[in-house]
């Protein structure tokens, strides 16, 4: 599924090491849908890995590395 390109709608996560990362909301998903899937580990989050990279440079981290998450409407 394609990601939205504008970056204005995403989940902002803070990692255990203090760094921050963004999870773009997939095209066709609402911010609330994406947040719920993340919290309940559904859909693309169900395998215990969190996608934080881009389509060109995919990167994943383990759920255990995430200490907080918030839904963001604008940068």
Image: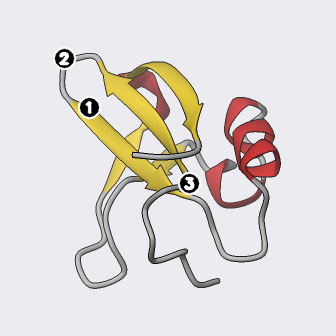
Please determine whether, in this image, residue 13 is positioned above or below residue 57: above
Contact between marks 3 and 2 (CB within 8 A): the answer is: no
Q: Which residue is mark 1?
A: 20
Mark 2 closeness class: few <14, some 14–19, many ≥20 residues within 10 Å: few
Whole-percent x, y for residue 39 in the image = 71, 30
The alpha-carbon separation of the residues under discs 3 and 2 comes to 22 Å
Please determine whether, in this image, residue 46 is positioned above or below residue 17: below
Residue 23 as seen in the image, left or right of residue 38? left
Secondary structure, mark 2, is loop
Residue 26 as seen in the image, left or right of residue 20? right
Q: Earlier in the sequence, mark 3 or mark 2?
A: 3
Q: Which residue is mark 3?
A: 9
The chosen color scheme is: secondary structure
Q: Residue at x 67, y 40 (%)?
A: 38
The alpha-carbon separation of the residues under discs 1 and 2 comes to 7 Å
Whole-percent x, y for residue 58 in the image = 30, 71
Q: Residue at x 42, y 31 (%)?
A: 13
- Count of numbered circles on the image: 3
Q: Which residue is mark 2?
A: 18
Secondary structure, mark 3, is loop
Could you say which is closer to the camera, residue 48 or residue 9?
A: 9
Q: Earlier in the sequence, mark 1 or mark 3?
A: 3
Q: Residue at x 63, y 69 (%)?
A: 26
Could you say which is closer to the camera, residue 14 or residue 9?
A: 9
């Amino acid at each position: 599924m394609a990601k939205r390109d504008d970056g204005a709608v995403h989940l902002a996560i803070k990692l255990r090491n203090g760094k921050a990362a963004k999870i773009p909301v997939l095209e066709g998903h609402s911010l609330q849908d994406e947040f719920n899937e993340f919290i309940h580990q559904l859909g693309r989050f169900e395998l215990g890995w969190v996608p934080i990279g881009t389509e060109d440079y995919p990167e994943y981290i383990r759920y255990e590395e995430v200490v907080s998450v918030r839904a963001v409407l604008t940068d």
